[in-house]
Amino acid sequence: RSIFDGNLRHSADVMSPILGVSVRAGAVYAVLADSGRIWWAGSAAYQSVADLADVIARLAGESGKRTRGVRVVLERDLVQLRTLVPAPPLKPGAVARYVALEAPRLFRKNGAPLATDARLVRLSKKESALWAGAAAEPLVQAIADGCAQAGLELEALGPAAEVLLWALGVRAEDAAYVFPNGSTSEAVEIRGGRTWRSRAVRCADHPCPEWALPLA
């Protein structure tokens, strides 16, 4: 099952209300956006994956505005991300299958089957990177179930590193950003406006980036 979708995009591009959900270990955060504005935000804790579907459904009901679509991101503590440079000589259509077959070598299984996906990111005229991700399949299924319980269409599901760029007030096509996240930070690298690498950094003394106005 794919966890990268390609439909993760800036909420300002969406004219109808959209619910954005971010899931991390033990907590879910939700934001209702419409025409580039934030109308509502909420959060809830959960104890286990078994509780996750109900928590997502409850948050969706508390938003106070009808929406049919939801986009979900997984924070760095729930998703494994790998970058291979240079990328193996693969056609775009074969990338996801390659990563699925190579998952035991690329990712830790941690006792659960994995949902994986990947894409190619062009770094230069001669070089590309393979940007791959994996998440526990029970987690992905619980998210899908929660959206279904709330009557929402799951439009996209992927790593938070894919959308953090759009949270910035000032951003560049080629750059590196560090996002503090509790006791750790996430270093995200962008090339051609697309994320191609994410690293968990074990220090949280980096300055907070300049957020886009609605978030600030």
Image (spheres, grey):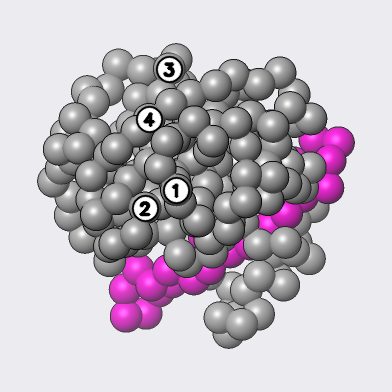
* Residue 175 at x, y percent in the picture: 23, 51
Q: Is residue 101 left or right of residue 16?
A: right
Point out the stretch of residues depicted in magenta.
106-135
According to the picture, the residue beneath numbered tag 3 turns out to be 182
Task: Tell me which amino acid carries mark 4.
Answer: Ala
Task: Tell me which amino acid carries mark 1.
Answer: Arg
Q: Is residue 125 left or right of residue 69?
A: left
Quadrant location of the N terminus?
bottom right
Report the Cα–Cα distance between label 2 and label 3: 29 Å
Residue shown at 70% from the left, 71% from the top:
98
Q: Are marks 2 and 1 in contact (CB under 8 Å)?
A: yes
Q: Does 44 appear above or below 59?
A: above
Q: Secondary structure at mark 1?
A: loop
Q: Which comes before the other along the chain, label 2 or label 4?
A: 2
| Other-residue count near label 4 (Cα within 10 Å), few / some / many at <14 / 14–19 / ≥20 | some
Report the Cα–Cα distance between label 2 and label 1: 7 Å
| Other-residue count near label 2 (Cα within 10 Å), few / some / many at <14 / 14–19 / ≥20 | many
Front label number (4 vs 1): 1
Q: Which mark is residue 17?
A: 2
* Residue 125 at x, y percent in the picture: 32, 80
Report the Cα–Cα distance between label 2 and label 4: 13 Å
Task: Tell me which amino acid carries mark 2.
Answer: Pro
The answer to whether residue 183 is visible is: yes
According to the picture, the residue beneath numbered tag 4 turns out to be 41
Q: Secondary structure at mark 3?
A: loop
Residue shown at 29% from the left, 50% from the top:
34
Q: Does 43 appear above or below 73?
A: above
Report the Cα–Cα distance between label 4 and label 1: 14 Å
Q: Which comes before the other along the chain, label 3 or label 4?
A: 4
According to the picture, the residue beneath numbered tag 1 turns out to be 66
Quadrant location of the C terminus?
top left
